[in-house]
Image (spheres, rainbow, N blue to C red):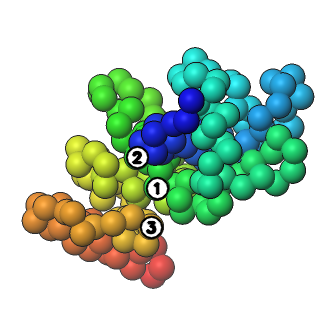
Amino acid sequence: GSLYPEQVIECAGLIFAIYLLAGKQFIYKGMTGSTPDDAINLHSLTDLINSETLVSTIQSRLFQSVETELFKPWHRSVAEYLGAKWLAKAMSSPRIKRHILSYLIFDEGVVASLRGLFAWLPTFNSNLSEIVIKTDPYGLIEYGDTNYFSATDSVLLFDALEVKKASNLIVSN
């Protein structure tokens, strides 16, 4: 049967989150044993979502076919947005939240290739605003969306930018 748009978006979010966290170039739809080194295998995700949904989703307009059985997102920012939506929803417990954040934050900063994904997290889970603001306020402004921020979040963002500015001045002198 065909999927509801919400199912495609949720499944694409999962695929994009894994794709971005793994740092791969492609998503491979073929046999697991023949997965290229620069790709994640779609079928490795069947513990999380059924195979039929995964295959239908990869054939949606959110993905482009690069060659037979090899796909990539149409646009990285769409992958970051939907991946963050899926991850933010997945961070349902403190343990899972810590585990996911351990892939994103390194040496008190965000892994450079994951800044866009990280910046979108508070859009979908306001409990993540503080950690995102304090860790990467510049990335949040550049890649995320602060329109929904509370007054408290806005003050926290301003203060975090001031702290970053001061530490950059100290480093550059």
Pointers 2 and 1 in contact (C-beta within 8 Å): yes
Q: Nearer the viewer, residue 165 or 93?
A: 93
**130 lies above or below 34:** below
Camera-side mark, 2 or 3: 2
Q: What's the distance in space between the residues labelled 2 and 1, CA to CA? A: 6 Å
Kindly state the secondary structure of the residue where label 2 is placed: helix
Q: Residue at x 19, y 63 (%)?
A: 149
Task: Give neighbour class at mark 2: few <14, some 14-19, many 20+ (Cα, 10 Å).
Answer: many
Left or right placement of residue 159 versus residue 91 in this view: left
Kindly state the secondary structure of the residue where label 3 is placed: helix
Res 85 label: 2
Q: Residue at x 10, y 65 (%)?
A: 151
Res 92 seen here: yes
Tell me residue 100's x, y (percent).
45, 35
Q: Earlier in the sequence, mark 3 or mark 1?
A: 1
Residue under label 3: 143
Q: Earlier in the sequence, mark 2 or mark 3?
A: 2
Tag 3: amino acid: Tyr
Task: Give neighbour class at mark 3: few <14, some 14-19, many 20+ (Cα, 10 Å).
Answer: some
Q: Which image quarter: residue 6?
A: top left
Q: What's the distance in space between the residues labelled 3 and 1, CA to CA? A: 9 Å
Tag 2: amino acid: Lys
**144 lies above or below 162:** above
**11 lies above or below 111:** above
Tell me residue 140's x, y (percent).
38, 64
Q: Nearer the viewer, residue 21 or 75?
A: 75
Residue under label 1: 81
Question: Looking at the rendering, in which quadrant would you find the C terminus?
Answer: bottom left
